[in-house]
Image (spheres, helix red, strand yellow):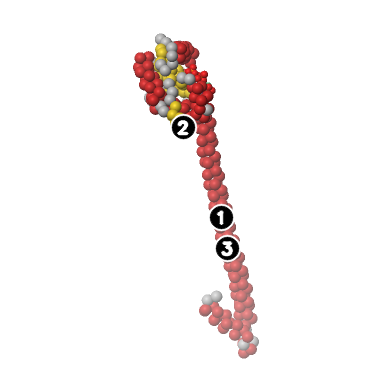
Amino acid sequence: MTREETELMAQVEALLSDPAHADSPLRPALARLHAFHRAEKQRLERLVTIADGYQRYVREDERKAQRRYQKSLRRQEKLSRISDGYQQLMHERNSALREASTHDPLTGLPNRRLIDERLPKLDERKQYTLVMLDIDHFKQINDRHGHEAGDKVLVAIAQTIRQELRDYDLCARWGGEEFLLLLADTGLSEARIIVDRLRLRLAELSILVGDSRLSITASAGLSEYRDGEDLLNHTLQRADQALLQAKRSGRDRSCIIM
Ligand SMILES: Nc1nc2c(ncn2[C@@H]2O[C@H](COP(=O)(O)OP(=O)(O)OP(=O)(O)O)[C@@H](O)[C@H]2O)c(=O)[nH]1
């Protein structure tokens, strides 16, 4: 209520309660006007209270909706973090599984399965030489120094093969101490130079096992891929025969079957 209104109401109430105006013909009308004004005022106050309450309710409701929205946003962020993490984990697991199924766990070299997968992708226009490389008298290493020593030697051999070959050559651990090399874009005479250099590097290895230093030699059989033939059947058979020949003629050498 404004100050002016308060003063006016006080003035009207004073007039109404003054006995000097009890018989005034204006008094009943003034009394009704005063009562009407008070009733209106109370109604207005009630309305204001209701409107305030409604606004408070709306504000509180908005705050609740905001809190619910923030909470659901946080939950969604959490879910998407979990989902991202899960996808990453699945990706890593798949890569690990793929790695495990296509590589030899001891040396990390590709295994037969990977070679089987890669071979259909050979470029028919290129020359390829297939090499079977086998470590000589490997059994003696196991027998004399134990299986673990044999494993250590195999790891060192694989490392040397990897270092000596070019990026575009393929190499795999084919069996126990037998390795398959596929030299791309390479004819027999060039392949023999590469293989003999590799055998020399292998012979130079001096692998520390306990108190002993072990050295090895390797034999190799080479054969060139002929157009249209099955590499893992025909070319491989000739390379195997060449390897047998190398073993039979004294080991520590490479042989070729044309
Ligand atoms: N330490 C170890 N030894 C293995 C592994 N795989 C195969 N071998 C061993 O390799 C040896 C191969 O022996 P052989 O086939 O007789 O061949 P070798 O003694 O190398 O004789 P030649 O090939 O005729 O020169 C066996 O004793 C196998 O047990 C392996 O993963 N780790």
Pointer 1 residue: 67
105 on left or right of 170: right
Using a 10 Å C-alpha cutoff, classify the residue at mark 2 as few (fewer than 14 neighbours), some (14 to 19) or many (20 or more).
Answer: few
Query: Residue 219: horizontal and vertical position, in percent?
Result: 43, 17
Seen in the picture, residue 52 relative to 111 is either above or below; the reply is: below
Residue 112 shows in the view: no
Q: Is mark 1 within 8 Å of ligand 1?
A: no
Mark 1 or mark 2, earlier in chain:
1
- Classify the position of the N terminus by image quarter: bottom right
Identify the mark at residue 176; answer none if there is no mark: none
Residue 160 x/y as whole percent:
41, 27
Q: Residue 132 vs residue 62: left or right?
A: left
Q: Amino acid at mark 3?
A: Arg
Work out which residue is located at the far front of the displayed protein and give it: 211
Query: Where is residue 184, by image quadrant?
Result: top left
Farthest residue toward the top? Answer: 258
Q: Nearer the viewer, mark 2 or mark 3?
A: 2
Q: Could you say which is closer to the camera, residue 150 or residue 89?
A: 150
> In this figure, which residue is indicated by the disc labeled 3?
56
Q: Amino acid at mark 1?
A: Arg
Q: Are marks 1 and 2 in contact (CB under 8 Å)?
A: no
Of labels 1 and 3, the one closer to you = 1
Say which element carries label 3.
helix
State whether residue 197 appears in this view: yes
Camera-side residue of 134 and 48: 134
Where disc 2 sits, the SS reads loop
Q: Is residue 42 above or below residue 173?
A: below
Residue behind mark 2: 211
